[in-house]
Image (cartoon, rainbow, N blue to C red):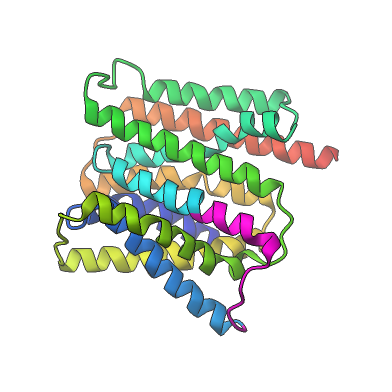
Amino acid sequence: MLLATVIILWGVNWPVMKLGLADIPPMTFALSRMVLGALCMFGVAAARGGIRLPDRHDLPIVITVGLLQMAAFLGLVTVALQFVPAGRSSILAYTTALWVVPGAAILLGERLGGRKLVGFLLGMAGVAVMFNPAAFDWTDRNVLIGNGLLMLAAILWAAQIIQVRGHVWHASPLQLAPWQFTVAAVALLPVAIVMESGESIDWTGQLAAVLFYNGPIATAFAFWAVVTVNRALPAITTSLGTLGVPVTGVIASTVMLGEPVTPTNLTGLALIVGGLAWLALGDRKASRAR
């Protein structure tokens, strides 16, 4: 039930973020989400026995998660949402696991077996479909920027995942989370000031609801929920379950924003999700073999 809740919360958040951008500049939005997430997670840490400074051995993971997975990924995605429909954005952002495959093979020496290769090629075929000239306007500068930022965000998150695989943890993810959110907020603050100093925030009831949903719910609660799910369920179950996020994102964007469900999005989504599922199954087979 908790995994299903996370899938729904994160999927629905794509159109929710799109709505929020009508009232708040993108980098300020991303900064607000990290500040709210940090405050909530510091509260959780205090309630669970106290706030502790990270061990020096965990500092690399605090910094890279904060900079890449949180600040860079969220900042790039939020800016991209100005130019790209929410449903399409959710699909492209979740290509992250595809980029982990060649990175892990090159940097960590992981074997690229037959199953993984098939999954990777399926997923890349889905990416190719999403960018086919018949359905993608290669002459529109904003479209190119938005889609490019989404792909860059996915690649940066993949780089962070590869780094995590080689890290020996000295504290739990929940103990480190408040500090990772803090690193992200500190990194986003000067960017928001420089890029959006002359822009205003329209404090509406919609924006208040969006910030409440994004901070305590889609960020802090969902982070805790994912950690809990990872501890309770097999990794393959979690990996396959999270593939429901872009599917939910497309459906929610259609319902909430009236975005059309195009053949390109459906085909690309099917190939990418199918490829990621095949990769996850390949990981399960490799684990059993070991």
Q: Residue at x 34, y 45 (%)?
A: 251
Q: Is residue 165 above or below residue 83?
A: below
Q: Is residue 211 above or below residue 188?
A: below
Q: Residue at x 17, y 69 (%)?
A: 205
Task: Give coordinates of residue 143: x percent, y percent.
Answer: 26, 29
| Nearer to me, 34 or 15 | 34
Q: Which residues are magenta?
A: 49-66
Quadrant of the image containing the C terminus: top right
Q: Is residue 257 left or right of residue 7?
A: left
Residue 52 visible within the image = yes
Residue 200: quadrant of the picture:
bottom left
Q: Is residue 58 left or right of residue 159?
A: right
| Nearer to me, 42 or 198 | 198
Task: Give coordinates of residue 29: x percent, y percent.
Answer: 29, 57
Q: Residue at x 33, y 56 (%)?
A: 190
What secondary structure characterizes most of the magenta part? helix
**Which residue sits furthest top?**
133
Q: Is residue 170 above or below residue 103?
A: below
Residue 264: quadrant of the picture:
top left
Residue 16 visible within the image = no
Q: Is residue 49 left or right of residue 110?
A: left
Task: Give coordinates of residue 58: x percent, y percent.
Answer: 66, 61
Say if the magenta span includes residue 64: yes
Quadrant of the image containing the N terminus: bottom right
| Nearer to me, 175 or 184 | 184
Q: Residue at x 42, y 54 (%)?
A: 10
**Which residue sits furthest right?**
290
